[in-house]
Image (cartoon, rainbow, N blue to C red):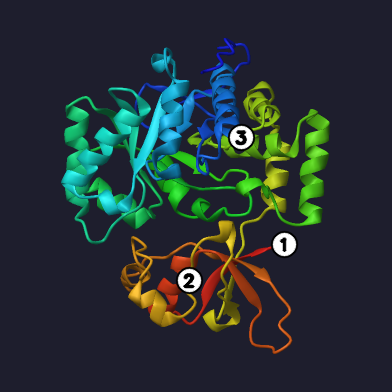
Amino acid sequence: MVLRFALMGVIPMRYKTLGNTKVKISAIGQGTSGYLPQGKEQEVNQIRALDLGIGLGMTFIDTAESYGEGYAEKLIGKVIKGIRGKVFIATKFSPEHNSYSDVRKSCEASLKRLKTDYIDLYQLHWSNPRILISETMGTLEKLKKEGKIRFIGVSNLSVNGLREVQAVIAKGGIKSLQTEYNLFDRTIEKTVLPYCEKQKITTIAYSPLDQGLIADGDKRIKVLKNIADRYDKTVAQIVLKWLIHHSSVIAIPKAIELAHVRQNALCADFVLSDEDYEKINKVFTPTYALVPPDKIRVIKGGQDNRQVYKTLEEAIENKLGFVPSPAELAEDIRMGEILKPVKVVKIIDWEGKYDYDLVEGRVRYWAMVIAGEKTIPILIRGG
C-alpha cells in the first residue's frame, strides 16, 4: 500500500529543462539501481523512500528492466498509482534486447510492470555491436510516434557513440545521456560533457555519490566537510550540489533511508558559491594513471561481487555473455575509441608481481588487453 506523504511542493526543488524541450525535470532525481526483492519489510521501506522523494519534489525517477529483473519497475508502478501525471519516469532496455522486435517487447513489458500507458524517457542502456544502431533507434522513433514513449535517451556512450546515434535519428532526437559522474570519476568532463552541452543533451549522472564512497582521501574529505559545515549541510549534499551546478546535469542518487531522501531533496534550498565550487574543482582535479595491464590483478569480488573473467582466454570466450563482450569492445579501441579508466586499489604484493587489484571495469580491462594496449588508464581508490 502506497504511503502518500502529500508534501508536493513543500520544499523548493530546482528544475531543469530536458534537452532541447520545454519539459522540466527535477535536478535531483531518484535512482533505483540495486533495488532488489528482499522481503515485504524492505519493499515497504523502498516504497516509503520513493514516495517521500516525490512529495519533496524529486519527481524524476530512473529505473531499468534489468534492475531486480523487473522488480524496480513493479515497485515504481505501485508508487505512482494515482499520481502518474506528477512524475517523470525514465527506464532502460538491456543491450541483449536492442533489436526491433526485442525493443518493442521490452517496452511493452516495462509498461505493464510500471502500470502506465507511456514512458516519459526510454533509454538505450548499453550499445550492442551485434545490432545495427539504426535498427534500435528506428524502433524507438516508431514507439515515440505511437505514443508509447515521449522522449528518447541513451546511456554509457562516448562522443563517438553519440555521433553514431545522432547520425541515424532525427536531428535533436536524443534528449539525454546517462553516464557515471561523481567527484572520483570525472572522466566525462574532458569530451562527453562539453559535447552534450553543445548538443543540448541533458546529462543524467548515475552513481553521483560514488555508491556511498562519495570521495577518496582524508584531506579531500576534510575540504568537503569544512564547506559543508559552513552551509550547515552534509558532505553528500555539497557533492550533489556541485554536480547540478552544471547547467545541463541532473543527478539520480539512490536512497532508502528516509533521512537520506530528505537530505537529497534539501540540496535545492541553498546556493553553492563560485568560490567553493572552484575549490572543490581544484581539490578533486580529475587525474588518472597509466599502468601496464600485467600490474593489475583480476580477482573475484570487486565491486558488488560481480562476476569477472580471470584469464584472457575466459574473456575472449565470454561465457558469461557480457554485451558488448570484451572482444567487441576491443574492436572499438582498435578503431580509436577511448574507454574510461578502470578502478583499482593499491596493494602490497610480497612477490612483487602486482601493484593493484581491479575493483571495477572488468569488461573494459579485458577489452584493452585484447586490443593490445601497452598501458591501461586507472583511477586509484584511496589514491
What is the crowding at mark 3: few (fewer than 14 residues within 10 Å), some, or many (at least 20)?
many
Amino acid type of the residue tagged 1 in the rendering: Gly
Instruction: Tell me: residue 255, above or below residue 295.
Output: above
Task: Measure how far apart labels 2 and 3 are at the Cα level.
Answer: 30 Å
44 or 50, which lies in front? 44
Instruction: Tell me: residue 113, above or below residue 69.
Output: above
Q: Position of residue 90 (x, y in %)?
A: 39, 33
Label pair 1/2, CB-CB below 8 angstroms: no
Q: Looking at the image, which residue is at 77% across and 49% down?
A: 221
Q: Is residue 259 visible?
A: yes
Which residue matches tag 3?
255
Is the C terminus in the top left, top right, bottom left or bottom right quadrant?
bottom right
Label pair 2/3, CB-CB below 8 angstroms: no
68 or 232, which lies in front? 68
Q: Looking at the image, which residue is at 66% across and 32% down?
A: 257
Amino acid type of the residue tagged 3 in the rendering: Ala
Task: Measure how far apart labels 1 and 3 are at the Cα level.
Answer: 24 Å
Which residue matches tag 1?
382
Q: Looking at the image, which residue is at 29% across and 51% down?
A: 163
What is the crowding at mark 2: few (fewer than 14 residues within 10 Å), some, or many (at least 20)?
many
Q: Sequence-wise, which precedes: disc 1 or disc 3?
A: 3
Q: Sequence-wise, which precedes: disc 1 or disc 2?
A: 2
> Judging from the image, what secondary structure is the residue with disc 3 in?
loop
Q: Position of residue 176 (x, y in %)?
A: 38, 38
Residue 319 picture quarter: bottom left
Using residue 184 as the reference point, say whether residue 17 is left or right of it. left
Residue 7 picture quarter: top right
Which residue matches tag 2?
365
Q: Position of residue 247 (x, y in %)?
A: 51, 33
> Judging from the image, what secondary structure is the residue with disc 1 in?
loop
